[in-house]
Amino acid sequence: MEEPTIFQIINSMDKVTNNLIVQWNKVFDEDLGVSHILVLGHLMVHGDSRPSDIAKVLGLTPPTLTHLSEKLVRKKLARRIRDETDRRIVNLGITDEGIVTVQRANQKGVELRKNLFEKLTEEERKQLLSIYEKLGRSV
């Protein structure tokens, strides 16, 4: 058997990722993408945050985070908060509706993972987790 090239591996991983995104959009019909939920999740865990800090943690560019933030604020899932000591600083915070949205997204995520990974045996799930953990450490 011929050893797969790095390009074949990347292609296979991309197919799985793209399939997950398509399935996500079907089950979570909120006009929000995965990146929006990641931003809200960050705010829910870490509290009010500077957009530049959120972008850095999530590996997004500042302009991308600005675009995501605009939509979240427009949908009343997040709010802008001016710093009391320096009015030039604007933090982003999550609203109660944003928290509910993250909770719904997490529930849909659980269902999506269950559907995806039920094709694998328990041993295969453990192996997959081990592989991703190992690859994640080498980056």
Image (tube, helix red, strand yellow):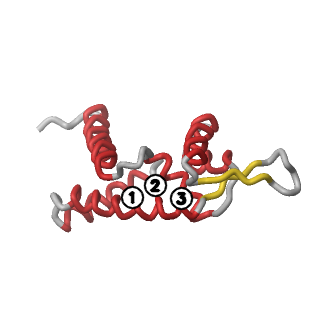
Residues at marks 1 and 2 touching, judged by CB atoms closer than 8 Å: yes
Image quarter in which the N terminus is found:
top left
Image depth: mark 2 or mark 3 in front: 3
Q: Is residue 113 above or below residue 58?
A: below
Residue at 39% x, 51% y: name it. 135
Q: Amino acid at mark 2?
A: Arg
Expressed as whole percent of the image width and height from the top left, the position of residue 13 reads: 29, 42
Disc 3 crowd rating (10 Å Cα; few below 14, some 14-19, many 20+) is: many
Expressed as whole percent of the image width and height from the top left, the position of residue 61 reads: 59, 37
Location of mark 1 (residue):
133
Location of mark 2 (residue):
137
Question: Could you say which is closer to the camera, residue 126 or residue 94?
Answer: 94
Separation (CA) of disc 1 from disc 2:
6 Å
User: Label for residue 98?
Assistant: 3
User: Label for residue 6?
Assistant: none
Expressed as whole percent of the image width and height from the top left, the position of residue 34 reads: 43, 47
Residue at 47% x, 59% y: name it. 101
Of the image marks 2 and 3, the number of the one nearer the N terminus? 3
Q: Quadrant of residue 42?
A: bottom right
